[in-house]
Amino acid sequence: MVEETDIAVVGAGGGGAVLALALAQKGIRTIVLEQAPGPPQGLRGEILQPNGQQVLDQLGLLSTLPGESTRTVQKFHFCRVGGERLCTVDYGDLPPPYNRAVVTLPNVAHHAILNAIEREPSVSLRYQSTFTGLLREKDRVVGLTAKQGEAQCSIQAKVVVGADGAFSKVREALQIPAELHLYPQGYLIAMLDAARPMDDAKYFVGKRTILGMFPAAGSKVYAFYMIRAGSYDSVKAQGLPALQEAWIKIDPSSEPIFRTLTDWKQTAFMPTGRVRTPTWVADGAVLIGDAAHAMNPHASQGRMQAMVDAMTLADLLPECLATNEYSATKLRTYETARRPQVTMLQKLADEQVLFWNTANPVIGFLRDRVFSTLDRNARLRYRVLSTTAGLRKDPPFGMMDRLMAAGFLPDPSARDVAAGGIR
């Protein structure tokens, strides 16, 4: 069986689903292949940064997210292990209307996107469908092959989009080399309960210790706890009380919340990795999201960047279809627009890994000193916030800024938020 479509997307994750919906709203025929049996159901914490909120707004979905499943958070407090506050970042300092973070219950935004796709007649979303290879004419990709259930199929497409994650099979079939780095740490995620809703988010740093606590809807609280990659089973073997005691030492004031962890089913493990590739495009094919540029979650932008990828590509593909031009040169317009911000965020996340995950007391001292400086310096704090929010394409700090943040130089513009403007 051979089918024809305009665009074939492999993967219905954060980038692939957004792309499919954005194309559907432009009336472009799209087939989406997803190897999972259905929409995701697992535990995962999700913070919609302002740029992600903007994408959902453009798709007409932000205002439709169920209020009982979302929670607006304005302030994030960075603290030293033990409870001492180092710095507070207030999303209210950003320009409206996206001057907040939005924490959702597991998969809420993703399900809203998938449900919207199912209502679009120009899109076919197919679960239990596995990519098996590419169709080519000379050096150009003209479609793909897949296994749908037990049936083999071929799909001819003007453009094939690989949105299939850090271990992308599409990228492999395109023979695009990738530098895949798996970090030695990952995150244990837990869903906890609070007797009364938390007002603000808290993020604790110490000697090779990170614990984030984010208020969610319905008096729920997400906990993100850094552990060694591959140690999830050994952490579970030590028992729930041991994990609770470790958290209580980090934040004694939250002991009642930590005591609500009563079953390992409230937890999951999130590995972390980074992908770098020399190109995201080929003749007739393109990579988006983690397939092109996975990054450490310290950047708070992995899923958001996949969504912005999708919207940028969705703006380009109608022109490609109108001109019948699908070359790598044409598709590189998308990569040229997106790569600077992605590269900056990957580098920033790796710097944060060095400083935030450290066991070195000197580096830890400098880290805490920078946080304390940011608490007093509105200009530098705004630069960090606008980067985390996905609104900045250039690095938040130049060399002089770094010296000021470390407290080695005075900052005459410390109170001038406008001087930290978004670029």
Image (tube, rainbow, N blue to C red):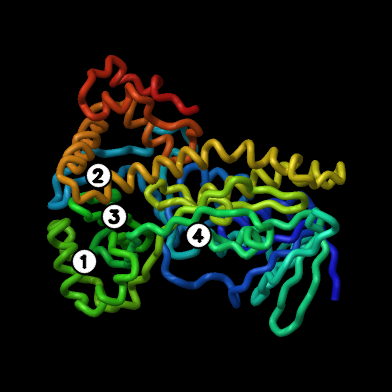
| Cβ–Cβ under 8 Å for marks 3 and 2 | no
Q: Which mark is residue 212?
A: 3
Outermost residue on the bottom side: it is: 150
Q: Residue at x 60, y 77 (%)?
A: 37
Mark closer to the observer (1, 3): 3
| Cβ–Cβ under 8 Å for marks 2 and 1 | no
Task: Report the residue marked by disc 2.
Answer: 78
The mark nearer the N terminus, 2 or 1, is 2
The mark nearer the N terminus, 3 or 2, is 2
Between the residue at mark 2 and the residue at mark 1, the CA separation in whole angstroms equals 19 Å
Between the residue at mark 3 and the residue at mark 2, the CA separation in whole angstroms equals 9 Å
Mark closer to the observer (4, 3): 3
Q: Nearer the viewer, residue 289 or 179?
A: 179
Mark closer to the observer (2, 1): 2
Task: Report the residue marked by disc 1.
Answer: 258
- Residue 61 seen anywhere in this rendered image of the structure: no
- Give the percent coordinates (x, y) of residue 123: 75, 62
